[in-house]
Amino acid sequence: MAEIQISIRKVVWKNAFVFPAAIWLISRLLIWAAMLLVAPHLSAPSQGIAPEFGWGVFDAWDSVHYRAIATSGYEFANDGKQHNLAFFPLFPLTIRVLISLGIPFEVAGTLINNLAFFAALYCIYFWVEENYGKKEARWTTFVVAWCPLSMFGSVIYTEGLYLLLSTAALRAFDKQQYRWTILWGAMATATRPTGLALIPAFLLTAWKQRKPFIAYVAGIATASGVLLFSLYCAIQFGDPFGFIHAQHGWRPSFGFDWQGWLDMLLQITLGTSYKENLGMKDFLHPLLFGIFVAYGYYLWRFRKYVSSLVVCGFYAFVSVLLILADDWFIYNLLNAVMVLGGSYVLWNLRTQLTPVTVIYGLCGISLLLASGGTISLSRLAYGIVSLSVAFGVFLSRHPRQGYLSLGLCGILLARLALKFAQKLWVG
């Protein structure tokens, strides 16, 4: 009997070990194929380029600033213009270490993000499995790896590193490993601004669950990463809040940007802007929006009677429309799904998720809504792992919808990878 139990455990461990790696590899192969094999053979779009095969396809947009920080250091002036001090230091610092070993910037940045994303999938898988079960862990891994925004886990961005560090901190806090919580949390707050949401999340969870005093200490000590960055700003630029003031160049004002949200929703529904004359500019926009709303209501109202043929037909039709839709519709749709849809699912499952998962998700979304803009919201929301956990738990209970949703995500994932390689804005 003991030998049988040992054999079963070995099989379970093997499956748990193989699954995240397989999902990572398949999803990354799709991205690499789109960026390295397809994009170089397409003609240059009007506002983009025709990329060449090589590491350069992973270097665009924010990557330029990480390159400057890693090679030349920070620059800042409190003049309201865009300065790279707005980007947190841990990611470019790790790149600089590899550059000092003779590894080119493109290779160093791409390897760090990809390997960190690979490790993040394992950390997410085991964290979710420990709290909810294997089925939920697998679906959450699917969501994280196949979400269209996971493309940023393969280019020179911070997504992979931040997902790894923030999830490790959350998992350590759930397991009452407070020294590890401090280490991972401090590194997360030194990686990107949304890491600051970990601090109130830990403190509120400690209060809600009546945790020991050390849990409060760990929550406060998590801020050490951003405090060290603040100390650097004070020494280098004479402004301890320079990294906050630098944000004004990217987001001119803080607070809820209702005009940006109104503009985004109008572009989704009508393809227009509140600054322009209201009217339909692209029939695909109201058509797609109407289909999503009508089908969502149909699924909710008649969910017990929906046939597989109806579901498959809907997804096939939407797949074609998503291929034909313009880039701004996709960009704004992802914003709405990640922020609004993710918040709804997280709140709906709030009693079924661990407290720190829910509170961190709500704190992270609140921070994004108060950031003063809608630019890159979908990408930043993707970095809040609580939303992926909520989506994963939800889809584990509705697998038919889940598998078809993954098909749509695969289409959008390849599309975003292709656009990024062409140096087009995708978030």
Image (cartoon, helix red, strand yellow):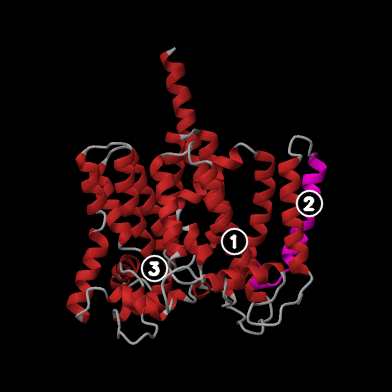
Residue that mark 3 sits on: 108
Q: Earlier in the sequence, mark 1 or mark 3?
A: 3
Q: Earlier in the sequence, mark 2 or mark 1?
A: 2
User: Which numbered dot is residue 314?
Assistant: 2
Mark 1 vs mark 3, CA separation in Å: 33 Å
Q: For numbered disc 3, what is the local secondary structure?
A: helix
Residue at far top of view: 1
Q: For numbered disc 2, what is the local secondary structure?
A: helix
| Residue 414 locus on image (x, y percent) | 63, 63
Query: Residue 41 lies in magenta, yes or no?
Result: no
Q: Quadrant of the C terminus?
A: bottom right
Check whether the beta carbons of the residues at disc 2 and disc 3 lie within 8 A of each other.
no
**Residue 380 visible to an observer of this rendering:** yes
In this view, the residue in front, 11 or 194, is 194
Q: Which residues are magenta?
A: 307-329
| Residue 337 locus on image (x, y percent) | 60, 58
Local crowd size for mark 3, using a 10 Å CA cut-off: few (<14), some (14–19), many (≥20) = many
The amino acid on which the numbered mark 3 sits, given as a three-letter code, is: Ala
| Residue 177 locus on image (x, y percent) | 27, 40
In this view, the residue in front, 418 or 317, is 317
Q: Earlier in the sequence, mark 2 or mark 3?
A: 3
User: Which numbered dot is residue 336?
Assistant: 1
Q: Nearer the viewer, mark 1 or mark 3?
A: 1
Report whether 307 appears left or right of 266: right
Query: Residue 311 lies in magenta, yes or no?
Result: yes
The amino acid on which the numbered mark 1 sits, given as a three-letter code, is: Ala
Q: Quadrant of the N terminus?
A: top left
